[in-house]
Each structure stands twice: as C-alpha cells, then as structure tokens.
Image (tube, rainbow, N blue to C red):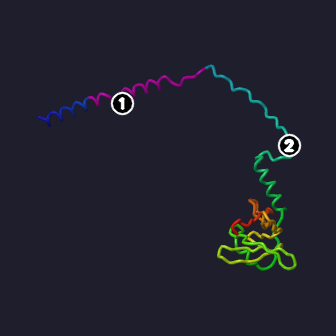
Amino acid sequence: MKRALSVLMMLTGMALLSGCSDSDNLSRLQAFVAAGPKTNTHIMPLPKTVTYKPKAYENPINRDPFTSFSELLLRKEAAAASTGPRPVSHGPVQPLEKYALSSLSITGIVRDNQGRLWAVVGTPDHKVYRATIGSYIGTHDGRIVKIDDGMTKRSVTVEQYLPNAFGGFQKKPTVLQMQNGN
C-alpha cells in the first residue's frame, strides 16, 4: 500500500513538471525576433566636453606637495642628527664602560691628597672602581664631567651620547646620586 502511494505521488509530480515546458518561452522568443529591432528615433546628443586648460603649479614655499608635514619634520630632524655630536674614540674600553650606566651605583666620594675628587663606583657583579672627572663610564661613551661632594647632595654627573631614531646621537647629562644609606 505504501509502495503504491509513493509510485502515485511520483507519477503526479512528473505530470506536473511536464506541463512546464519550454514551448511558452520559445514562442515568446520567436515573437520578439519576428518584431525586429526597435529603434528610437529621438536619441539625445552627447554633452559637449569642456576643453582642458593646463595651469602651472605655483609653489611659493618650494614644498613637495606629496610629502606630509610630519614627514618633512622627520626629515629635518634626521638631517640635524647627522650633523649633531658624535662620540670620539678614546682607545681601549675602560672597566666601567662594560656596564650600563643604570646598573652602576655611587658608593662613595673621596678627596685625595692633591684635592682631586674621586667617585667610588659599585658594579652589578659587586666590584668597586674609582673614577674621576674625565673618566669614561657606561656603555654610551659616557664621561664624568662633575663630581659633587656637598653635604646634602653627593652626586656624579655623566655626559653620554645616546643614539636617536635617525642614526645620530644626542648628548645628554645624567646624574648618579649617592643613596642616603651609603
């Protein structure tokens, strides 16, 4: 019974699909071709084109119009960096030049018999060195330019050459202070 019902439904579906033939579409296509091409006797003319008149570019400040102001500023800084200060080679690397300036600590300041001030500098590996004005210190060609042995502020000023983003250097002073506990 179920089988007979499914066969009946299948035959009904085929009969419905056969009714939708292409003959209706074909007859419409034949009627369209038989009517021939349709021509519109009233065609709008093309609009008139404006003649191009070239104009010379005027640039009173002589600036590249395709370069942004921020890029021009970066170029200016880069040019200034190439003419800025440069570290000078001073011979073999001194012991205190093997350490980053931030890793060193001032453990004392003493005065010798001739009146020269010496900074006692501690390293991360617990070594102690002495340095005076003109001694090289730190990894950025730092040089001690001032030792202050005042009662309230005991410090060492180091001038070092820090690299900038343009391949040049910037001379920058850094102050290392003794801690109160030292």
- Residue 24 covered by magenta stretch: yes
Q: Name the residue rendered at 39%, 25% in the picture.
A: 27
Q: Name the residue rendered at 66%, 76% in the picture.
A: 126
Q: At which x and y percent is residue 37?
A: 53, 25
Judge the density around disc 2: few (<14), some (14-19), many (≥20) Cα neighbours within 10 Å: few
Q: Front-most of 5 and 73?
A: 73
Q: At which x and y percent is residue 18?
A: 28, 30
- Residue 132 covered by magenta stretch: no
SS category of the residue bearing label 1? loop
Residue lying furthest front in this view? 151
Q: Is residue 50 left or right of residue 36?
A: right
> Which three-letter amino acid code belongs to the residue tagged 2?
Asn
Instruction: Locate the N terminus by quadrant.
Output: top left
Identify the mark at residue 22; answer none if there is no mark. Answer: 1
Q: Front-most of 162 and 73?
A: 162
Residue lying furthest top in this view? 42
Q: Report the magenta stretch's main SS.
A: helix
Q: At which x and y percent is residue 64?
A: 81, 47
Identify the mark at residue 100; answer none if there is no mark. Answer: none
Instruction: Locate the C terminus by quadrant.
Output: bottom right
| Observer able to see residue 182 | yes
SS category of the residue bearing label 2? loop
| Observer able to see residue 168 | no
Q: Front-most of 145 and 20?
A: 145
Compared to residue 34, the image places residue 178 above or below, namely below
Region of the chain picked out in magenta, as a range? 16-40
Compared to residue 56, the image places residue 101 above or below, namely below
Image quadrant assignment for residue 123: bottom right
Q: Is residue 41 left or right of residue 53?
A: left
Identify the mark at residue 59; answer none if there is no mark. Answer: 2
Q: At which x and y percent is residue 147?
A: 81, 69
